[in-house]
Amino acid sequence: MKLTSLICIFQVLLISGCTFTNSKKESLPPPNIVWINAEDISPAFGCYGDNFAITPNTDALASKGIVYKKAFATAPICAPSRSCLATGLYATSMGTQHLRSVTPKPEFIKTLPEMLRNEGYFTSLSGKTDYNFDPTGVWEYWENDNTPWKKRKEGQPFYSMFVFGLSHEGAGNIREKYESSVEDLPKEMFHDPAKVKVPPYYPDNEKARELWARYYDLVSAFDQKVGEVVENLEADGLMENTFIFVFADHGFGMPRYKRWLNETGLKVPLVVYTPEKYKSYFSESPGSTTEDLVSFVDFVPTTLSLAGIPKTEYMPGNAFLGPFRKDTREYVFGARSRADDMFETSRSVRNDRFMYIRHYQPQYPYIQDGYIFSDVKEVFKLLREEHEAATLPAASERMWHKKPNEELYDLENDPYELNNLAESDEYQLVKDSLRDELKNWIFETRDIGFLPEAEYMIRSTGSTPYQYAQSNNYDLAAIYNAAEMVGKASKEEFEANLQSEDSGVRFWSVIGLLNLGERAKSSLKVLLEVLENDSSPSVQIAAAETLCKLGNCENAIPVLEKYLKDDRVWVALQAARTTQLIKEEAKPLVPVINEVLKKYRGEDGAKFKYKDFNYAAFISWPLEWSLKTMGEQVP
């Protein structure tokens, strides 16, 4: 289907009985579509009822469009979210759920820009990709250009995406970056710290107020960028034919927001400007708000629908605008996996009232020890000082402790998610229902994240994680059941599962013993057998961590040394993180650590310290942190 046939498709759809709010027998040209994407922003806009926010440009668009009050990212961190926004697939289906990774993508899975380009659209990107797969060939035009549509052929519809990074957590937590981001912000748009409403996860003191006021300044700086894009569209006479999406990649770049699989981490602003000409493409009146649940997995089908193109069969989402729009969804789903060098496996489901979260590695606290949660960021320095002084609010203190197996929140009565109802007898039916929905989603989408990253990368050699996950070789039922035992089963049950032929089952059995802590002390012999004989690097490394935590690290050191030197970066990363977690016990590994750091160091005089801001950096960070912990010099 090419551009010349798109008008015919619209006519056929109308004649065939598709229901529109205001159905007129008229042919509409394919509209232009603009995505304006902010980094690390929650719905802190005037059009969301936030009276502290100063966002006139986004609010103006909202007055002529739709405000989605319940829009959600599929992950509380950028690269997995962008993977979904690019493909219309959950990152957990593709193996792109970690931050960051370089994951092969099947050739038949095309990105949104590629699909639109094949149908006659001009496609452009201003800003970063960050999809966790190779972005080569995705965009027709990729430049920092404020009017990219000028590069298209005359009359050609366009899809243009703008990614503005000035509100990233770096600017929210490091003063120099903040000042750079707001250098062009008018004086009257800065926010008074004295008027800040501090979230309950923070101490209500001068420093906290300063940091939150600064973040609102960053939201205003992003709003200025929205105004620039709109001004350029107006100047070129394009507003009548252009849908404009304004949204963020996940919540605020602050603790209990970014990286947290809660409402605060997943809920995003979404404002869609809807031109009057295309009023048959949406049900809401201009200037209205909707409580419909919307997920990032719906963005690709929606954009295709606006262009008159049905979604591809493998896409799990549905359009919420355009001729192919569907009824509203009942649930939105989220996933938290590795972020930089911090390993986690958590999944969530939310309906119109309740949020349920299952943590499969609850042995790790929300704020782990390491670089990304270090005092380099002002907000972590603030929280750490208050934590050490025992003056944190209870909601914040929880971030420093082991996670519960499950979380359940009544968002209607507890919007800040302060009261975990997972163990409340009154809410067991609600929890069971949501747990079942989450399980169904995991199986329907073939969540590859129930295997360790190194394991699924090894298993899918010569293919892709997506294709492996779709195959019968991936025994998701057995692996999922083993993961569900974590935090619930006995050491005897975990020991029995260590005899499984599936390394995924064995991995979760070791994690279950690790989570038991001292209660797994009598499992040392079994763990030593795993350490010495298991065929999976991920299982062996997990056994090494567990043995060290149980005070028997002597046999673990040679295994960690072996895998630190491994050229498979996902293997080396897991070994590096474990090396940091065992702290002083890693002392015999100091020569190896220095050797590995040299391996991943960038060239002398290079702009960046490491060979790349991906595995090279993420392997180096925990090893450098480990040296600091042991009082060793960091090269």
Image (cartoon, grey):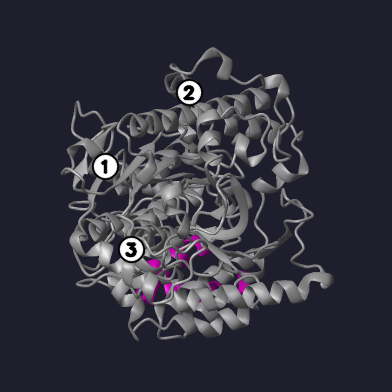
Residue beneath disc 1: 612
Mark 2 or 3, closer to the camera: 3
Please, what is the three-letter code of the amino acid marked with disc 3? Gly
Tell me which secondary structure the magenta stretch mostly adopts.
helix
Q: Which residues are magenta?
A: 521-548
- Tally the numbered discs: 3
Q: Which residue is nearer to you in this view: 146 or 479? A: 146
Pointer 1 local density, CA inside 10 Å: few below 14, some 14–19, many at least 20: few
Residue at figure coordinates x 72%, y 59% from the top left: 409
> With respect to residue 333, does 243 lie above or below?
above
Query: Is disc 1 placed on a helix, strand or loop?
Result: loop
Q: CA distance from mark 2 to mark 3?
A: 41 Å
Label whose residue precedes the other's in the sequence (3 or 1): 3
212 or 615: nearer the eye? 212
Q: Residue furthest top?
A: 187
Q: Residue 529 in magenta?
A: yes
The numbered mark, 1 or 2, whose residue comes first in the sequence reads: 2
Residue position marked by numbered label 2 in the rendering = 178
Q: Is residue 128 magenta?
A: no
Tag 3 secondary structure? loop
Residue at the image position 19 percent from the left and 72 percent from the top: 462
| Residue corresponding to mark 3 | 308
How far from the left and from the top, in percent, is residue 328?
56, 67
Question: Where residue 107 appears, x then y in whole percent?
Answer: 20, 67
Badge 2 amino acid: Tyr
Q: Are marks 2 and 3 in contact (CB under 8 Å)?
A: no
Helix, strand or loop status at disc 2: helix
Distance of label 3 from label 1 (alpha carbons): 40 Å
Q: Answer few, some or many: residues within 10 Å of disc 2's Cα (few below 14, many 20 plus, some between 14 and 19).
A: many
Residue found at x 57% / y 38%:
254
Q: Looking at numbered disc 1 in the image, what kind of residue is underneath it?
A: Asp
